[in-house]
Image (cartoon, rainbow, N blue to C red):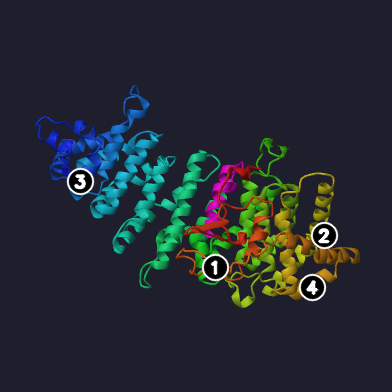
Amino acid sequence: MFWKFDLHTTSHIDQLLDREDVTLRELMEEDDVLQECKAQNRRLLLFLSQDHCMQELVRLITTEPPADLEERSRFKFPNIACELLTSDVSIINDKLGADDSLLEVLYHFLEQDPPLNPLLASFFSKTIGNLIARKTEQVITFLKKKEGFIGLVLKHIDASAMMDLLLRLISCVEPAPLRQEVLHWLNEEKLVQRLTELIHTGKDEERQSNASQTLCDIIRLSRDQANQMQENMEADPLLAVLESQESVAGLLKNMFEGERSEASIVNGTQVLLTLLETRRSGLEGLMDLYSQGYERSYTVSSSILNAIEPHIKDFQQLLLDPPKKSAILTTVGVLEQPLGNARLHVARLVAALLQTNALSICQELCNLSTMDLLLDLFFKYSWNNFLHFQVELCVAAILNHPSSEERPNPGLQNHDGNPTSIHNALVAHLFQKCQLVQRILDAWEENDKIQGEGGTRRGNMGHLTRIANMVVQNLEKGPVQSQITDLIKELPEDCRGRWESFVDETLRETNRRNTVELVSTHNMHSSSEDDDMESPFPNDLSLQQVGHHTSMETKMTPHTTVTCNNKYTFIPSNLLVEKESTLHQC
């Protein structure tokens, strides 16, 4: 028995288009209008590309709907209009890109007083961004004729859609010569300097945050594109300005000028941290690190470090006297004086500076006893794992110092001493002035006492275990092995005895408990075709290390586990790039 079906379906839009009096609104009411548009329905496209329809579509995405409309349907037509204009159909792109009157209506949206409606701003940015990618020459020519274009975009930088628009101008222009022309135009408009000026105590926090994020994105985009660039290609002028000593000095001046606010410190420091990145952030950078065998993707410019060095004392003062914050209630009680985002970002900056191995920077940090102060905060804020992670990175950078042949910034040296003596002084400072060994022992004994009385294990004990293991590993093998051995021998006899007992008994037992026993798998079979895939990570990242990372009873960063093909791969936390979190306030 056979059933007869008519599989050919006719869109209701075609029936509407048969009417001579059909309106744009009627077509936009149809659920399948976007589908028909992207399917190149010729009759629909001819209708939409008429002058009056294009004018109406552009008007919808640039004019705020009446406030008396129902909220959930208020932006229905502007949203559909935006989707139609950005449906990547050539006839619509050609009409929109070639008609200056339509571009003028779009441009007029920027001439409104702030704040812009964020939804309309996103529609505007998406439409212009699509034109930049598809009708590049026409749109760039139009925008370059508008003298105040960059100023208007920056006036509305509190809308995140304006950040997207700037980044599309930088990254979506092809071919390369035209892109270089756009970069020179943006540089002539002093885009970098104007964004830097927005990171200032007197500016609105949202504007500061978006300006900072834009600068960070420009740095990363420009560096990635520079890596892919042919040797004979001209350098990126925006990146050259951002990495110049003058630009970095101007940013630091804005951060510390007048009354210091947490917003300007945090947003400015984020730009500095991006400038100091030696590889791409996130998982991509982590994969690069493994595939390249710890080679650096970028070299930190000495001009950046030269600009930062005079202000290290200002960052040190922030650790001592941060912007005032009110008490906050946490899960472990009331915190009268929170660590704050500003001090956390200073800790991140110190860790990044130490990893550059710049001699004059190391000497200045040593002279200011910055590590001593960070260790004070490490033990004072025993539940702030974001801080603990940064302090651990600082200790690792000092103990895992590369030899002089491997140093990435040989030109940035202090004339008061040779590279080896300066770094040896930093290692000695860590063990003598900062009393790292004594602090580890005292904190461990105090935690044992608290737990013995029925209290809760301190939140920094996981990171303290890792730091202690780091010291032991460098005692056995490492670039400063002999120096650490001598420093341990110089400890008071009772302290040295406590340390040896701690390493042989307490730390060994802790590591044993933190070790995951491997389950025999020789009789286990799986039909998964991924079973034979080789791991992209070194073999020494065994499950035993996984157990150590996962049983520390400490909140690790979100990227501790990477999922690939339904398999879980654990990454050493000292290679993770930390994400922002409101927990920083604790």
Whole-Å distance between the Cαs marked 3 and 4? 73 Å
> Residue 272 lies in magenta, yes or no?
yes
Q: Secondary structure at mark 4?
A: helix
Q: Secondary structure at mark 3?
A: helix
Mark found first going from the N terminus, 4 or 1: 4
Report crowding for label 3: few under 14, some 14 to 19, many 20 or more residues within 10 A (C-alpha). Answer: many
Q: Which residue is mark 2?
A: 438
Q: Which residue is mark 3?
A: 92
Relative height, residue 498 to residue 10 (above, below): below
Mark found first going from the N terminus, 2 or 1: 2
Bounds of the magenta segment = 255-275
x%, y% of residue 256?
60, 47
Whole-Å distance between the Cαs marked 2 and 1? 35 Å
Whole-Å distance between the Cαs marked 3 and 1? 48 Å
Whole-Å distance between the Cαs marked 4 and 1? 32 Å
Q: Is residue 119 found left or right of 460 in the rendered image?
A: left
Q: Amino acid at mark 4?
A: Thr
Q: Is residue 375 found left or right of 152 in the rendered image?
A: right
Q: Which mark is residue 485?
A: 4
Q: Which residue is mark 1?
A: 537
Report crowding for label 4: few under 14, some 14 to 19, many 20 or more residues within 10 A (C-alpha). Answer: some
Q: Secondary structure at mark 2?
A: helix
